[in-house]
Image (cartoon, coloured by chain):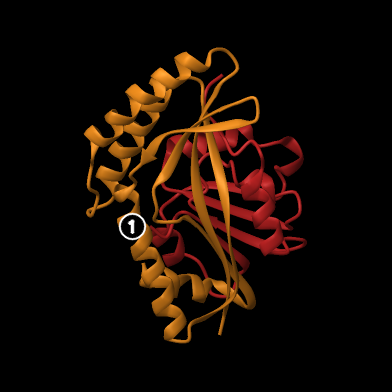
Amino acid sequence: MGIVVDPEGNEARALLDMAEFGGQHVLEVGCGDGRVTWGYADRAARVTAIEPSAKQIALARERLPVQLQDRLEFRAIAFEEFAATSPPSVFDIVLLSSSLC
Amino acid sequence: MVHALEEIHRLLTSAGRLIDIHPVAQASPVEIHQGGITHLAGLLDVRQWCVDYQEADKALTEVVQRGLFAVEGKGLFDSLTYYGSVPEMRTSLHESLDKFARDAESAVVDLPQVEALMGPAQAMMDAAGSGAELRIRERIHIARLRPT
């Protein structure tokens, strides 16, 4: 069977209840293998999902659905480095997936 | 953590929103679920995680008190993680603990406590027979904040 996280979809439901992703430019910090990303990415205009682990990003890219390829970018980079090279006022939503810790 | 929130404030548009999701600093029930009935096999003491989650809460409180962000909404939900077997759960928890020990200076690795859960969980799974599901229930906090 393997490990299955949140098959009930409670996290995606809570996320969609909490924010309106339609047409938004989203930065997800600590995206891991993209498990949370899939729950909202189809609604967003553009998603930049970052994660320091190259292994996790490789998994996310493997699982990236074709229909999301034009709007979703996965990057293996730490938040500090990403922020240092990013201009201000570019994201409509920043999502922290257990990544503030 | 506060510096990261300051950077996020800079990256957000003036009408943007910050969504924070992180586990609540409390023990997570290890459950055996079968036929609509849930039995408690034990509680996973997540002090290793809690230290950092409590720090995350403090950092969020600080930036709100400083007027950098305002809380617009918050809530709680449960996230369930299912394991195919007790050994699989053990391996996964050990990997998580190893990761936290590497990442968090404040990590308190408590392998004996994790190991103590395995015996009761295995005994309950054996007694339950086929169709029983082994899972950990984690309480998750979600909040929406707007930059001010």
The answer, for residue A72, to whether it is visible in the render is: no
Q: Residue A34's x, y, as percent? A: 57, 42
Q: Name the residue rendered at 71%, 60% in the picture.
A: A17
Name which residue lies at 23% across and 54% down.
Answer: B106
Q: Position of residue B40 (x, y in %)?
A: 46, 34
* Chain ID for orange: B
Which amino acid is tagged 1? Asp
Residue situated in front as seen by the camera: B88 or B8 = B88
Residue, x 26% and y 36% (percent of image)?
B113
Chain letter of the residue carrying label 1: B
Horizontal side of residue B25 vs A72, given as left or right: left
Residue bearing the label numbered 1:
B52
- Residue B64 x, y percent position in the rendering: 46, 80
Quarter occupied by residue B1: bottom left
The image shows residue B131, relative to residue A22, as above or below, that is: above
Give the residue displayed 49% in from the left and 46% down from the top: B138
Mark 1, secondary structure of its residue: helix
On the image, the x and y values in percent for residue B39 come to 50, 32
Chain A is which colour? Answer: red
